[in-house]
Image (tube, grey):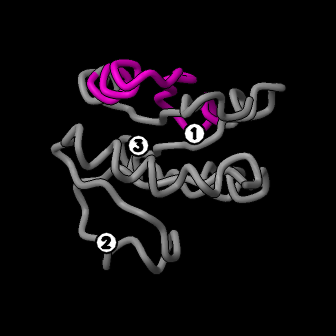
Amino acid sequence: MTETQGKLAIFVLEDEFIIADEIASILEDAGHSVIGPAATVEAALARLEGDAVPDVAIIDANLRGDSSLPVAERLRELKVPFCLCTGYRSNDLTSEFGEVAMVQKPVSPRAILETIRKLAPVAGGA
């Protein structure tokens, strides 16, 4: 999928239903379409195998004790810019995920949308 008039297809990986629903609502209210949300690494990787490659992704770093690093690696292979949505400090995740944009939990609509805007120029090879 590609950006159309500022609207993005955004993949969401989040294991907590309430947070996933909140993120999806924020994105949809801003006019974006949401792929997912997926709640597990396996579900996320399956979603990313289809033809609908997202423009941007928001992924939780920790999924009930499992790292989402395999999803981050797949997104990098697909050249999909992403950010981590986490309650962890960025210093705690840099060694595992590298330098990547982060949105702190509890989520703020402004923080999510600002981060997506910063990632969007990278989307679609632009």
Disc 2: CA contacts within 10 A as few (<14), some (14-19) or many (>=20): some
Quarter of the rendering occupied by the C terminus: bottom right
Sequence order check, earlier mark of 3 and 2: 3
**Disc 1 residue type?**
Val
- Residue 24, label in figure: none
**Disc 3 residue type?**
Leu
**Disc 2 residue type?**
Ser
Residue under label 3, please give it: 63
Q: Which residues make up the magenta segment?
A: 22-44
| Residue 56 appears anywhere in the view | yes
Position of residue 31 relative to residue 73, above or below, is: above
Residue under label 2, please give it: 90
| Residue 10 appears anywhere in the view | no
Write down the quadrant of residue 30 in the picture: top left
For this orientation, the residue located farthest to the front is 5
Callout count: 3
Point out residue 37 in the picture as x, y percentages from the top left corner.
Answer: 48, 24
Contact between marks 3 and 1 (CB within 8 A): the answer is yes
Point out residue 48 in the picture as x, y percentages from the top left corner.
Answer: 72, 34
Q: Nearer the viewer, residue 7 or 104?
A: 7
Write down the quadrant of residue 6 in the picture: top right
Residue under label 1, please give it: 41
Quarter of the rendering occupied by the N terminus: top right
